[in-house]
Amino acid sequence: MGDSEFSTISLEVYQNQVRNNPTFFRWCELTRPLPNTAGFRFLPIRQFKKEIVKTGDWEIEKIFESSSTTNTGISNHAIESLSFYEELSRRAFELHYGPLEQYHILALLPGYIERGNSSLVHMVKSFMDQSRGGDFYIHNFDCLNNQLNKLNEAGEKVILFGVSHALIDFATQYPQGQPSNLTIIETGGMKGKRKEIQKSELHEILKTQFNVSSIHGEYGMTELQSQAYSKANGVYFCPPWMKVVITDINDPTRPLEANKRGRINIIDLANVSTCSFIATDDLGFIRPDGTFEIIGRIQYSDIRGCNQMYQ
């Protein structure tokens, strides 16, 4: 999908969602201009904690739920079609890594696997079902270490999805000494389990302990159906149906140019049944080539003026 086609489809989706999504209409009306004028508006992600966001009338197959590590409530994302979610997740993954059938997919996701409605767990489980094999691990580090050693000895290609604090805990106890076909995909932060550290520092620790040249990353969230991936240095690539727009944190109506730091907003065309225009609480910037980097979370105590609308 080229830029022109993406822009055309985005406008059509935007206009449809303003007409047929009461939640999004109220936000666009509040922030004006409305969709027949210049400029998209992005729905604050926290709105998914207050109501079920839908465009049109359709039957819900699944509701994905977020964690609540910040004690600000749980986000709910209604999914019209799980098969659609699984297919696009697979396509986004295979754009960067090739066919799932060549990998063993392992996952170290404590805090996610215990929840029955995690979108991340659902995605990774669907990957396992299409791979050469896979399993989830929580605190059974010894079993994970044995499996990594076994697959390494067999020369198998392995992808390990893991949340940051669990990856550090595992790698500290079981540093991997032998070169292998192991790819680490970090899926999230410390979740209150450890002190937050700079992403670059985290990746240096993990590279050393896992004996790999780079740490990959997956950028997704409950409120989206698409994922961006980073293969090194925290630089993320979107699939063709997803785009990042940066806006001023104090004025959600003002987009910023490349290399300017601001709020990360997502256009996710996969969210056609809910809302494709999401204002996240993440801070970052777009690079001139369209890739993006994440700096951290927006501190609401530092936000002034117009952005009080996000509260």
Image: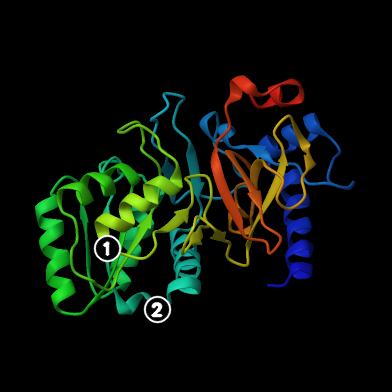
Q: Is residue 162 visible?
A: no
Q: Can residue 250 be seen in this view?
A: yes
Image quarter where the C terminus lies is top right
Name the front one of labels 1 and 2.
1
| Image point (55%, 43%), residue name | 295
| Image point (39%, 62%), residue name | 214
| Image point (33%, 58%), residue name | 207
In the displayed image of the protein, which residue is found farthest to the right? 37
Q: Quadrant of residue 26?
A: top right
Q: In which quarter of the image is residue 65?
A: top left
The x and y percentages for residue 274 are 60, 47
Q: Name the residue under label 1.
A: 211
The x and y percentages for residue 143 are 10, 56
* SS under mark 1: loop
Left or right of 285? Residue 187 is left
The x and y percentages for residue 241 are 63, 64
220, 86: nearer the viewer:
220
Q: Mark 2 points at which residue?
A: 99
Image quarter where the N terminus lies is bottom right
In the image, residue 220 sits, relative to residue 282, either above or below, namely below
Whole-number angstrom distance, CA of label 1 to CA of label 2: 24 Å
Left or right of 43? Residue 138 is left
Q: How crowded is mark 2: few (under 14 residues within 10 Å), some or many (20 or more)?
A: some
The x and y percentages for residue 81 are 48, 58
CB atoms of marks 1 and 2 within 8 Å? no
117, 38: nearer the viewer:
38
Disc 1 marks a residue whose amino acid type is: Asn
Q: Residue 185 carries which label?
A: none
Q: Residues within 10 Å of mark 1 (few under 14, many from 20)?
A: some
* SS under mark 2: loop
Left or right of 21? Residue 271 is left
- Dot placed on the residue nearer the N-terminal end, 1 or 2: 2
